[in-house]
Image (tube, rainbow, N blue to C red):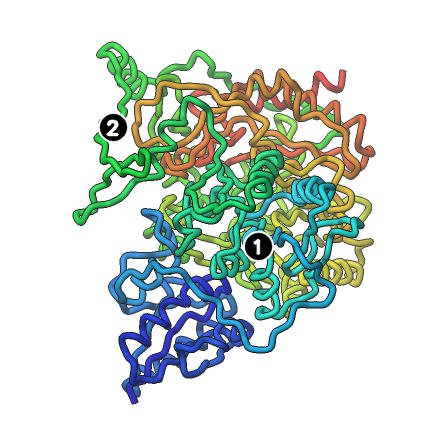
Amino acid sequence: MDNIYIELTEHLGDIIACEPVSKYLREKNPDKKIYWVLNKKYKDVVVANPYIDGIEEVDNLSEADVFCERKRKEGDTIIDMHYDGRLCCATGRLHKNNNKSEIHEHNIFAKKRSILNSFSQIAGLEPIDEAPVFHLKEGLKLPEKLPTEYVVFHCKSNAKDKDWSPKKWNKLAEKILKSGIKIVEIGQEPVIKSNNPNYCDCTDIHDIQEIALIVKNAKCFVGIDSAFAHIANCFNVYAVLIFGRYMAFNEYNPYSGNYGKCQNCTIVYTKDISRCIPVSMVYKEFDNFIKNRTKKLNKRKLSRQFSLKTLSRNIFSLFNEFDENNNKQKYIIILGIKIKINIKPKTQKFTQAELLEYIDYVQNNQLDKSEFVELAEEGKEPPQSNTKLISFYLPQFHSFPSNDDWFGRGFTEWTNATKTVPQYTGHYQPHLPIDVGFYNLETEQAMKRQIELAKQYGIYGFSFYYYWYSGKKIMEKPIQMFLENKSLDMPFFMFWANENWSHLWGNGASEEILYKQEIIEGDAEKFMADILPYMQDSRYIKIDNKPLLIIYNPEIYPLDVLTAFVDKIRQIAKDNGFNDLYINTIMKPFMEPGVYKDYLKTIHFDGIVEFLPGCMHNLFKKIKKKIYNPLFKGNCLNVEEFVESKRYLYDSDARVFKGLFPMWDNTARRCYKGATIFESSPKLYKKWLKDIINWTKKNNPENEQYVFINAWNEWAEGAHIEPDQKYGYAYLQATKEALEEENE
């Protein structure tokens, strides 16, 4: 038959961006029939495309693979635009692309490629970079409720890392609405909360063609990187786009056409996550558009957060190009003339004495026992307190088949923890254990000794990380062994680590998803069937006969799916003799203390747990260090200043459980890319712990006085109170003293 089938089933933005592929194929194959294979919920994106002859509707990528394989065997041509290893959102199956493309998920935006450029190469075509077109059906009309002139707001994408905070969106909208400008919001659900007559909520409109028409007629598009921004690019609507770090990409531009050239748009950009961008910066760019709307705005614009010190570097980075041998060339444009410049790479210079000092430190730092604290006398009564210290517990220290397949036979967390070296003189790495040693958690002796140490120094209980994926469990052997062995007498509860499991765990090189986190029909019953034996154990921690449970990331699921799941597992708990469940989640970065109550009510949870350092990462100040490893791309942060300023003490409108970490340094796991080092000490940890014990006594009822330590044994993240070769039992001793001194 020799028809052509374009296999690009999802996502919405990808399909919109890749429209030029159909035009390219039509020009190359004027006499052949061309069909687009895509998810049926996106068919309106291509329904009016004049370059294709029809649409093949499927429910998901796996179904598309089956269809296309059949057509390939029948002699048809398949233009497969999915990268090898792409995960089917519905089935969790990995897609296999037979083209010899080196472009994968973790390097799609390398060299600032657009989606169109990358996906056309993935399909085995020549790189395509022209502007996409959104083809509208005839006879479309704008909704009657729309004002005659307006700007479009799109505030929420399908990837939370791209999103700006709702609080900032509302501040920006308030400033714009006050000036008399009319705002039309589009999207799946409203983010703007306003009674201003100049605000029009169109989030109830989900027809893609109708939304495209709304965007086309807007005077300006203000939003995040999303499918709707791709539509704005199709119609060349002026845009103010909010960009931050996404996945492994500190800087990327997914657009072709004008947006890809930074023409007719302003990209407000930060190398951190987008939530760091202040409202004032976005408003300034929007205000500039309003003031200059009568002029042509086809200037290259890129708004950044920068210091004067980095201005020159950021300008030059805009004009990197690659020659035919893939060598980077640098250019600067002056008065419209592109000039090639030669810049010698900046290298840090070290004296011979400094290098010798560093080498000596690397070889001998483990021999320095100046801060080592010996084991306390055993047999003494552990400290007593109403405040109960819970330490997070990682069960990764044993091999299991999935890890053997993904990362190599015998891989455990010790593989990560032991592979790093100091990045500067004075940097404590690697972290090496004593006492329990390099243990295997498949044996009860290791956990028995851990419990003895924990109780001796005042740890009340463990919170076991629980890895559960729609009935599939991994890393479950240690906690199953714990459940079956009643002699391991330690209070505990489960922390459901409900994130996608990716290759980032192993080597920092890829975000390929190995186990996808989702909630499907029947999962509430499966989840409770698996976890009830633990909750019914006498050692399981309960508050008012409500088993305690932490769900790490509720926002990974659609809200209606999440709340239905939560309500169902609560009912199952009641049906099994409990008063309810006591469900907590993790405090999100940049959440204001005054929004916790409404947030918990929305998701049907009871409390918020501080999971340090993530939830307060932005409150730590940087320290400059003379780094010897030129590959190191991370930061060193100041724990002493943070503890002295007591920025962790604040008022809240909901139940908050305080947390802290002894140390934190994930250079071992992150392989220097995006790693963060928090310089701490047992003395700082003790002071911090005393403060939050005191806060907990004043703010939480007696039966809810829990404090969370991250962690008992996160060795690859340098966060452990288990004894090590440098500090010995110092962090455990500091824990014990903090409890004792706060109870005097």
Q: Position of residue 261 (x, y in %)?
A: 39, 48
Q: Position of residue 638 (x, y in %)?
A: 52, 21
Helix, strand or loop for disc 1: loop
Q: Quadrant of the N terminus?
A: bottom left
Q: Nearer the viewer, residue 56 or 610?
A: 56
Asked if 9 appears above or below 598 in the picture, the reply is below
Residue type for callout 1: Ser
Q: Residue at x 60, y 44 (%)?
A: 164
Asked if 354 appears above or below 332 in the picture, the reply is above
The answer, for residue 192, to whether it is visible in the render is: yes
Q: Residue at x 40, y 79 (%)?
A: 52
Residue situated furthest left in the rendering: 325
Residue situated furthest front in the rendering: 294
Q: Quadrant of the C terminus?
A: top right
Q: Position of residue 342 (x, y in %)?
A: 21, 30
Residue under numbered circle 1:
157
Asked if 48 appears above or below 321 in the picture, the reply is below
Residue situated furthest bottom in the rendering: 1
| Real-space Cα separation, disc 2 to disc 1, in angstroms | 38 Å
Helix, strand or loop for disc 2: loop
The answer, for residue 608, to whether it is visible in the render is: no
Residue type for callout 2: Pro
Q: Position of residue 274 (x, y in %)?
A: 54, 41
Q: Label 1 neighbourhood size at 10 Å, few (<14), some (14-19), many (20+)? A: some
Indicate the quadrant where residue 561 lies: bottom right
Give the mark nearer the N terminus: 2 vs 1.
Answer: 1
Residue under numbered circle 2:
345
